[in-house]
Amino acid sequence: MRLSIPITLAICGLSLAASPVGHALEFEQYPALRYFSAEMTEKHGFSRDQLEKTFQCARIRPEIVSAMERPKELLPWYEYKKIFLTDENVRRGVEFWKKHAEVLARAQKQYGVSPEIVIAILGVETHFGRNLGNYPILDALTTLMLDYPPRSAFFRQELAEFLLLTRELDINPCELKGSYAGAMGLPQFIPSSYRQYAVDFDADGRRNLLSSSDDAIGSIGHYLKKHGWEAGAPLIEDVHLEGTLYFWIEKLGLKPALPVNQLTNYGIFPRRMEHASRRAALVSFEGEYGPYYLLGYNNFYVITRYNHSKQYALAVYELSEMIRKRAEQS
């Protein structure tokens, strides 16, 4: 999976200023780092001297932990959407579509993901490559492994994946920058996702998500396809609610559990019944004047595998629709 990376108080969590301060690592003062290095040596053939030299350039950054603890997704939907559903994002999305039309069409043919979805993800993640992140990824992953207990094990694994990835790409691990949570490149893949889902879509012999739009487009399509994307299938549906039984369906979560034609038994009535046999989830959002609900189908759920936030998924969907409609008019 990519990662449920929260988007912090800066747009996309990527323009948050990376502080130049932070204390250097004293290798011997961190038993967890020593154990990690020993494992990397035994399992993956890194030398101890090589790892010590690498971690000499790492810094522990308290601001990274702070960023993890104030995710943008905690904002109500009516505030969250203002960050991404902008005229600039729509305009740049249409321009990106025109510039990369052939590659987007090829990705759609191969993976079944419509161009506007791929484009919207790039818009939400990095403003189409304009904001790739300012944090040294080595700093981010090392800090979160050592100083963020709630997800220390997860980031320990991502640090291992990062070192393997940089070895495979022949890149200095001290030089790569990305988000405060270790995501990188145009589509903001974490290291494990980069290694597993990145594709060489421009056929130059490298899987380059750092600067290749073609590879980013193909990799997003590949990622979504591998997580169950269905070509031409719906994402969301407006819904009318009656009674109170719908509450129990909402509690089932984001993964579609019941066919639409069974949801009516719980007072859930979609605007249209053309997808009556499809499974759907009932998803709530905080509107400016109170909560409102949508049916989320499988493809909506698949977007939440890219980022485990229902708000992120809705932002991607709504931005994609805005870009598609603008492109049709141009």
Image: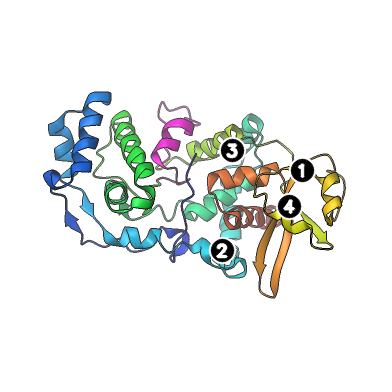
- On screen, residue 67 above or below 144: below
Residue bearing the label numbered 4? 249
Can residue 328 be seen?
no
Image location of residue 35, percent across then percent down:
21, 36
Can residue 108 be seen?
yes
Picture quadrant of residue 225: top right
**Disc 1 to disc 4: CB gap under 8 Å:** yes
Residue bearing the label numbered 1? 258
The tag earlier along the polypeptide, 1 or 4, is 4
Q: Nearer the viewer, residue 243 or 34?
A: 243
**Disc 2 to disc 3: CB gap under 8 Å:** no
Task: Please provide the residue range marked out in magenta.
Answer: 184-209
Identify which amino acid the numbered label 3 is placed on.
Leu
Q: Nearer the viewer, residue 135 or 123?
A: 135
Residue bearing the label numbered 3? 224
Identify which amino acid the numbered label 4 is placed on.
Ile
Label 1, residues with CA under 10 Å away: few <14, some 14-19, many ≥20: some
Image location of residue 289, percent across then percent down:
69, 75
The tag earlier along the polypeptide, 3 or 4, is 3
The verdict on residue 325 being magenta is no
Give the number of the mark in front: 1 or 2: 1
In the picture, the disc for residue 88 is 2
Give the number of the mark in front: 2 or 3: 3
